[in-house]
Image (tube, grey):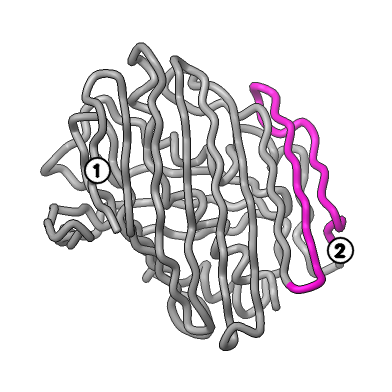
Amino acid sequence: MSRVMPLVLALMSGFFILTTGGLSALAGETTVRATYNITAPIGSGKFHFASSQDGARYKMKGSADFKAFLGFYNWNSAIASNGYIHSYKPRPNIYAFNARAGKKSERIRLDFSPSGVKKVRAIPPTKQSAKRIKVTKAHLRNVVDPLSAVLTFTDQAPSLTNGTKACNRSIQIFDGRHRFNVKMSFKRKAYAKLSNGKSRTAFVCRAKYRPVSGHKMNKSVSYMSKSNGMEIWLVPLPKVKMYVPYKMVIPIIIGTAYAELASFKVRDPKHGVIALAKP
């Protein structure tokens, strides 16, 4: 299988998790559990996420299971990141990614300094090619890993009415092989129908995928970068100062990939357990 689906799942890993950065000032540990259903033209799967945050320190982990071509192709991954919050922004320490598809496996580890990535270990190594845009040291500065990217949504006062405030931001991500940016802007309001039978207002953000380096500008990458159809739906949860990603829409050359919230639970010292959706 091409690198398109793993890249799509990396994008989903970076946004289909809770934006828990606003919780860092609370005393005691805050934990989050969430599950998303993934569907694509060639198959389907699930993404599971768990995080804990105590003061400025955070730990995150996730796993994805994706089956394609009537179950003849299975893609499984485990992902983890840890770091701390500084001035309401994530400062990753370590990022680890492991994946297996059939007999093929992949492992990536990133070590960070306060200014960016200081060490990259990828097995197997990225294949060298004249068509591949080279990743330079400059591309590794001031970036976050796909999991820590969620903390760039930190908001001390999530708005219930202002979609521009919720959406307008730009995020620089490096996943161990690709450096890319995601530029977000407000598109419209919609209603998110949750699995507990309730509905909430969602801010639909337009997300532009902008590849920087590590990729080949093939038809798939070119299509994704030119598309205006990528969306991230954010549901405000003011009690715990976060926006919860409800849905993500990613147009790919063979159709459209989706991820949608299936279950969500956050536990914090002040409010106890809050469940936005449940199976």
Q: What stretch is highlighted in magenta?
A: 102-128
Up-down relation of residue 217 to residue 84 (above or below): below
The image position of residue 275, as x and y in percent, is: 24, 43
Q: Going by the picture, which residue comes out furthest to the top?
A: 27
The image position of residue 204, as x and y in percent, is: 25, 57
Horizontal side of residue 257 vs 277, given as left or right: right
> What amino acid is labelled 1 in the image?
Ala
- Which residue is label 2 attached to? 127
> Gap between marks 2 and 1, in whole Å?
44 Å
Inspect the magenta stretch and tell me whether residue 87 lies in it.
no
> What amino acid is labelled 2 in the image?
Lys
Q: Magenta segment, principal secondary structure?
A: strand
| Quadrant position of residue 133 | bottom right
The image position of residue 248, as x and y in percent, is: 37, 62
- Which residue is label 1 attached to? 275
Q: Do the residues labelled 2 and 1 touch (CB within 8 Å)?
A: no
Image quarter in which the N terminus is found: bottom right
> Which badge, 2 or 1, comes first in the chain's sequence?
2
Residue found at x 60% / y 70%: 5
Up-down relation of residue 269 to residue 59 (above or below): above
Q: Who is closer to the viewer here, 36 or 133?
A: 36
Residue found at x 52% / y 85%: 254
The label on residue 115 is none
